Image (tube, rainbow, N blue to C red):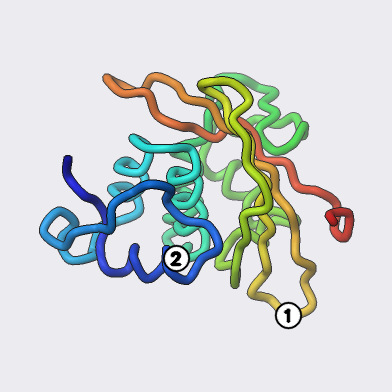
Amino acid sequence: RPRMGGRRWVAAADSRSIGPVGADPPSDEWSGAGTLKWRDRVALYAQFSPEQTLEALLAALQTNTLEDDGIEALYTFANFDVWEISSSFFGGLKMDLGQFERFKRIMISQPYEVLLRHKDRRYLSGMMIEDDQYVARIEVESSRPREPTRVFEFRMSRVMLGNHRSWMVDRIVVEPAGEHP
């Protein structure tokens, strides 16, 4: 089977508390020597476990650029109906997220902006609820001084995308600051 990723992927996996579970180290001939864009990395990781998909999305958010490619990665793998007026993707907040700019507006606001260009993250827990449903709690340390560390709960499900079943993010819930053990 082909091996995926690149040198940067290996370095990121080595320096994180969470990383791809059971994945082979990446090979340069497959990845273009570590130059894969987030779309390619996320598309490749979506074929694997929910932990790997979530790690790819968090890495994209951590390295979010002025072009908002990290936010775009999350938007691409957000499992909501773009035609639905009252999506509850962001922890029960009812809003229209069909347009990328509306989704981005939430991501650059508190408390979700902590995910953007964050300093570090730590996997607190993860659990398969059913064969195609997964939930994980991730502690995220902001890169901004005096901003509290936040805990986010990511709910994911495996859905059909083209010919493949891929892990998608159904919901992101943020715990109030200071309420996690």
Q: Earlier in the sequence, mark 2 or mark 1?
A: 2
Label 1 crowd (10 A; few <14 / some 14-19 / many >=20):
few
Q: Is residue 106 above or below residue 15?
A: above
Residue where numbered disc 2 is placed: 65
Reply above or below: 165 against 179. above
* x, y percent for residue 109: 70, 56
> In this view of the protein, can residue 158 be seen by the observer?
yes
Residue type highlighted by circle 2: Thr
Residue name at image x 81 percent, y 48 percent: 175
Please state the total of marks drawn on the protein image: 2
Q: Which residue is mark 1?
A: 145
The type of residue carrying mark 1 is Pro
Query: In the rendering, at what x and y percent does residue 89 appear?
Result: 65, 33
The residue lying furthest to the front in this view is 22
Image: 150 above or below 147? above
x, y percent for residue 128: 59, 30
Q: Farthest residue in the left direction?
A: 29
The residue located at (21%, 49%) in the rendering is 3
In 3D space, how far apart are the residues under numbered discs 2 and 1 (Cα atoms)?
20 Å
Q: Quadrant of the N terminus?
A: top left
Q: Quadrant of residue 6?
A: bottom left
